[in-house]
Amino acid sequence: MIKGITSYIKTRMNKPSLANKPQLKILPRSEHPISRSEIHEGALKVLYRLHKSGYQAYLVGGSIRDRLLGRNPKDFDVATDATPEQVAELFRNSRMIGRRFRIVHVRFGREIIEVTTFRGKTQETSDKRIKQSDEGMLLRDNVWGSIEEDALRRDFTVNALYYSIKDFSIHDYTGGLEDLKNRTLRLIGDPVTRYREDPVRMLRAIRFAAKLNFTLEAATEAPIREQANLLLQVAPARMFDEVLKLLLAGQALATFHLLREYGLFAFLFPASHEAFKTDPLALAMVEQAMKNTDIRIQEGRPVTPAFLYAALLWPGLKQIFNDLQNNGVPAFPAMQQAGNRLLQRQNQHITIPKRFAFPMREIWDLQLKLPQRQGKRAWALIQMPRFRAAYDFLLLREIAGEQTEGAAAWWTAFQEADEAEQHRLIASLGRSPNKKSGKKRRNPRRRKPVAANQG
């Protein structure tokens, strides 16, 4: 909900034409609710030092948007006319990053304040500071400009609001204040061109629409389905973090539904997309995982990328695994082969780092081991590092309707029971189906007698 926004946004403000020169609208401090006491201390230090050094300094983007919506910002980004090199000279606790677009990270303990230089626009395609692919995707963009140009280079109007440290006013060049009031997400500039410049903007549109509960403006929405395949041009390594941003904002289920509605999910997780067509439980599994993710985030509990990706990829893995088993491959080799095939395909869309891929595969492998809990196996399994994640995953599958033969309920009882009850639970399972019955056969060969007092 926009908390009191209508009281400080002037209704007489006319929305500017984004194709023409920006029409600046300024809200003085008396007409907006943002206070310096609500701004991160590190961000204030950056703003003041830039300002005292003779540079323009503005808080920009999501922090302004969220405060005007009555939300608590997580990130505080700064925009300035100082170049990255000039910013780095002012802050010893900084480092310059980025190739496509250079920015400066200023570190305060564990917090990072991101400082960007106002971006400009060049018409010279031969300019070495800017580089585009044949499809129009920006590969390098280090052209500096004015704040007016910078506003038009940002993605959405609601993210192009600037808070001036000079007089504490808010500057709006694109009609973002009015779109905030109307709960509308509007892309700045021609949507087709902007999506081609950076296809990830389509994912950002979905993320903000779900996160803020905003409606996509018609022109912003129209090209998404047709241009969804542009996601194939984005580096798979970059897509890993983008998907985490999508699903760890607290609205994973809503985001998942929007990704499918606009045809984007198929270009992120193609194997799972195909599995949804034939396996109704596959969709239920992922939906339940998204629900659980939202609950954990709301409760302040962590969500590990390994578990999240394990759930998102499970439908495709299960389909390959079943095909291999139907062709006579035993369960454990089939699981290994299925994981290899799936990740080989998936890494063409989203590269999953090894530090997450390995535990993800352990979670999958344990789905075959958890049902085999007779004898001493139960105690051995419960001591394994990935046991808890694998148990949660098994429980997720059972809730989604998969047949687990009661294994999830059994493990729940086993963890809560005392030692005597645990022995009873194991005894109730009966003999392991893999254990040979009968007494151990003696070696028929006659053993040589051992001499007394030998050695």
Image (cartoon, rainbow, N blue to C red):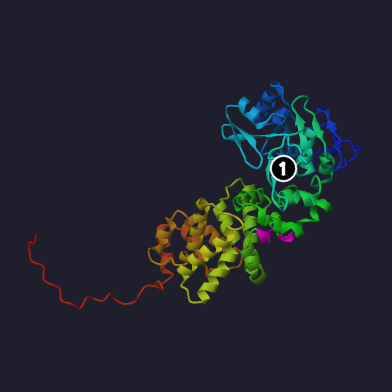
Residue 68 horizontal/vertical position (percent): 77, 37
Q: Quadrant of residue 352?
A: bottom right
Residue 67 horizontal/vertical position (percent): 74, 37
Q: Residues within 10 Å of mark 1 (few under 14, many from 20)?
A: few
Q: Which residue is at the front of the view, 255 or 127?
A: 127
Residue at horizontal 59%, vertical 65%?
316
* Horizontal relation, residue 428 to residue 221: left or right: left
Is residue 266 part of the magenta span, yes or no? yes
Residue 187 horizontal/vertical position (percent): 79, 47
Image height of 134 relative to 34, above or below = below
Residue under label 1:
126
Is residue 16 part of the magenta span, yes or no? no
The N terminus, quarter of image:
top right
Residue type, numbered disc 1: Ser
> Is there any visible trace of residue 99 in the rendered image?
yes
* Horizontal relation, residue 327 to residue 197: left or right: left
